[in-house]
Amino acid sequence: MVESQIDATDPDDPIARQFRLDPREALEVPGFNADPVGDLAANAVPGVLHKYRGRALLVLTGACAVHCRYCFRRHFPYGDQRLDEAALEQALAYLAADPEMTEVILSGGDPLVLSSRRLVSVIERLAALPHLRRLRIHSRIPTVSPERIDDSLCRMLADFPGQVVLVAHVNHPRELGAESAAAFRRLRDAGVTLLNQAVLLEGVNNDTEVLVELSEALFAQGVLPYYLHLLDPVAGAAHFAVDAETGRERIEALRACLPGYLVPRFVVEQAGEPSKTPIG
Ligand SMILES: *Cc1c(COP(=O)(O)O)cnc(C)c1O
Ligand code: SF4
């Protein structure tokens, strides 16, 4: 799927850029490190990242359908997080013990690379958590493997007793096409609320017109822009960095030509803060 989105004749293709190894990754750049957002300090029990009140990440797998070269968890020690039955029990007990825990976010890695059988077994147990109202899924699958959004997956999400939110990860409008539109439609038909997070990336989407088109194309497929992230300074990704001031200008330009609901919140993740931090 990703291959079909790439223009092989374009050496600067904005989709290829996200996945292709770049010699600049080997450069050591001050400020860029292995744990840029304090994940290790937030690792409450294996598989759980708990930073914010009322919601926590459950990391079911370190695998993804694609490997984004700017991924902020590219150095994350997933090997230590493997959720065997005992660890999953411990993770669920941790989530159940917090009376404020109203939302669990399946993230990773990409939770939708797991089999439907594995997902059903985890989601059924999440549904039994005493305080849970919402299940959130962070996934790139609707655009990189849209066929994975199949009947069994949609039925499972439709059956979840609380609300289900899926946050897609699309950085460039060309990642969207007829197949992603069909996948998002199936999700919406299953009652899933669709949002998108993108990362502001040099060589990919650091361009007002591209960002405008991204918001338009997402909404045309029933997806609301949620976050535009400033790049997390992870080692090996410095060549993707766009400075905060440029990002602020992009957002102002978007605000001048789009309805407010199509302007994503421009944020940065700072270790130790109680939420993502808005910029500007
Ligand atoms: C980003 C993140 C969330 C989600 O934050 P929202 O602002 O609710 O989207 C939750 N937990 C962790 C550990 C995160 O990194
Ligand atoms: S899909 Fe998300 S978690 Fe997976 S490599 Fe890309 S940014 Fe990282």
Image: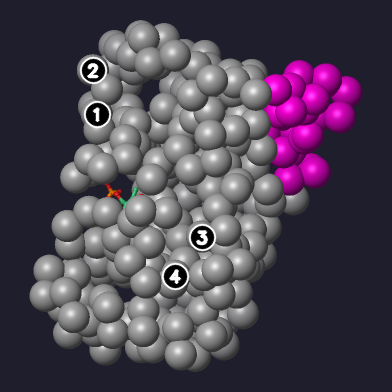
Residue 278 is labelled as 1
The reply to whether callout 1 and callout 2 are in contact (CB within 8 Å) is yes
Residue 163 coordinates in the image, percent (x, y) = 26, 69
Q: CA distance from mark 1 to mark 3?
A: 23 Å
Along the line of sight, the residue nearer the viewer: 106 or 255: 106
Disc 4 on helix, strand or loop? Answer: loop
Q: Residue at x 32, y 21 (%)?
A: 258
Name the image quarter holding residue 62. bottom right
Front of the two marks 4 and 2: 4
Q: Which residue is mark 2?
A: 280
Residue 187 coordinates in the image, percent (x, y) = 45, 64
Front of the two marks 3 and 4: 4
Instruction: Kindly give the residue lying farthest to the right in the view shown.
Output: 9
Q: Looking at numbered disc 3 in the image, what kind of residue is underneath it?
A: Gly
Q: Residue at x 44, y 70 (%)?
A: 47
In the rendered image, residue 6 lying in the magenta stretch gets the answer yes
Name the image quarter holding residue 197. top left
Q: Looking at numbered disc 2 in the image, what kind of residue is underneath it?
A: Gly
Confirm if mark 3 falls within 8 A of ligand 2.
yes
28 up-or-down from 123: above or below: above
Q: CA distance from mark 3 to mark 4?
A: 9 Å
Along the line of sight, the residue nearer the viewer: 267 or 234: 234
Q: Which residue is mark 3?
A: 108
The answer to which of marks 1 and 4 sits earlier in the sequence is 4
Q: Which residue is mark 4?
A: 47
Q: Residue at x 35, y 53 (%)?
A: 41
Q: Residues within 10 Å of mark 2 (few under 14, many from 20)?
A: few
Disc 1 on helix, strand or loop? Answer: strand
Disc 3 on helix, strand or loop? Answer: loop
Q: CA distance from mark 3 to mark 2?
A: 29 Å
